[in-house]
Amino acid sequence: MKQKYQLQTVTPVHVGSGEILNQIDGCYAEGRWYHIDLDKVLAHPSTDLNALTSEMSQRGFRWERYLQQHNLDFVELSAYNLPCPQSPEEVEIREAIKTVGNRPYIPGSTLKGAIRTALLGDILSESDDIYEKSLSQLETLIAQRPRGNPRREQPARRIESLAFGKDPNRDLLRALQVSDTEPLESGTLEIGMVWTVTLNQNDRLVQKIDSGRAYKNFVQQIQAQQQLTFTLKIDDLLFREREKTRLGFSDFQEKTLRDIAEVCRSDADTLMRSEQDFFEYYNIPEIVEVYDGLIRLNDDLPEGALLLQIGWGTGYNVNTVTEIFANESESPKDFWLDLRERFKLGESRSQRGQYDASEFPKTRRILYRGQNPIAPLGWVKISPLNDYSKIEK
């Protein structure tokens, strides 16, 4: 089964290239950030290579000053420029993943990763056997002394092997193929300012500043209300009786995979209501309102459509399924706190070895405009484009 989908960004989305940009890479002027093309600068007839090299080696070098002093045009010498709410100054900018022509897109691996987490959560919730075996494995890890960095042990691998298959060749998600989206025009990108907000000692949700360092990022993001297309394919050949038996796929696993839209909608509803409660309790009404709209949108989606939160800044609850174990009545007393201590999740910075049981995770990343919170990052609506009667086989 192969289906073409339309992806619409509901809130801005940042999927990073892995590159970090700073004042050596570009400059800000009149509401835009210009990514300076060094080759264009060097090719300009007025450029003195030795003088430029000397200036760039200075600690306080800024392209704004250099270009103005030499009466050079920002646009002419830039690879591209993007709307930016304010000067990043010395704060680094996270670059978005793009094609060679600076056209942003969303990788299929990003979409598949979000779907995988939703499917894992559903399997753990619906299968008592897999849940109990996963819980037993986590209890075993808690009882063991960690070796080296405990976070690198990745207990999720053991749980995923129970839910999806014991090795990559027998992994259920082998049957799911998700393409990259078609790229957008470069003009659909903008630069947003994202703050990490955290609970302070007075139990108030505030912008995080630690030892004079402001935990904020500027990110190149796909603007809200942009539309991209991609394809999703389920390999039906792997679910023929012989192949299905050889790979060890159960009817339950197959049904879960084929119910992707329903599974993702349920997962999104749980996540959105949890996040809405969090921001309502800690009095950030602007974000509560955004989640209220997202919940209504999810409730009204047509058959086959779904919401996902993807990309950078989505947070711990989007990328893990530990909440299933933390909230289940079957979990042992203090299990969640024991698990956090074992893997050093949310350890107090001021008191090593101390873990606040009242709230975890206590940080979120929120898009801001000035001092006003605007939206969480990464929410997208995914809708089938062609009629189900026209799905390719």
Image: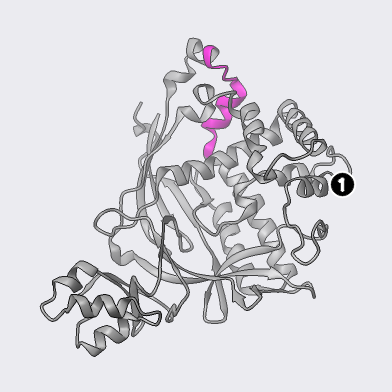
Q: Nearer the viewer, residue 185 or 25?
A: 25
* Residue 73, quarter of picture: bottom left
Left or right: residue 352 versus residue 375 is right
If the image is split into quadrants, where does the C terminus sit?
Answer: top left
The secondary structure that most of the magenta stretch takes on is helix
Q: Which residue is mark 1?
A: 334
Q: Residue furthest right?
A: 333
Q: At numbered mark 1, what does the secondary structure look like: helix, strand or loop? A: loop
Q: Residue furthest top?
A: 242
x, y percentage for residue 16? Answer: 43, 56
Query: Is 371 situated above or below 291?
Result: below
- Does residue 248 show up magenta in the picture? yes
Report the residue at 52% width, 81% height from top. 370
Query: Is 365 situated above or below 108?
Result: below
x, y percentage for residue 8? Answer: 42, 55
- Does residue 296 show up magenta in the picture? no
x, y percentage for residue 9? Answer: 44, 58
Report the residue at 73% width, 43% height from top. 324
Label 1 Cα neighbours within 10 Å, binned few <14 / some 14-19 / many ≥20: few
Is residue 263 visible to us here?
A: no
Q: Nearer the viewer, residue 318 or 95?
A: 95
Q: Nearer the viewer, residue 152 or 363?
A: 152
If the image is split into quadrants, where does the N terminus sit?
Answer: top left
Report the residue at 66% width, 32% height from top. 159
Amino acid type at circle 1 is Asp
* Residue 153, quarter of picture: top right
Query: Is 101 situated above or below 24?
Result: above
Q: Nearer the viewer, residue 338 or 268?
A: 338
* Residue range of the region highlighted in magenta in the rendering: 246-260
x, y percentage for residue 109? Answer: 44, 42
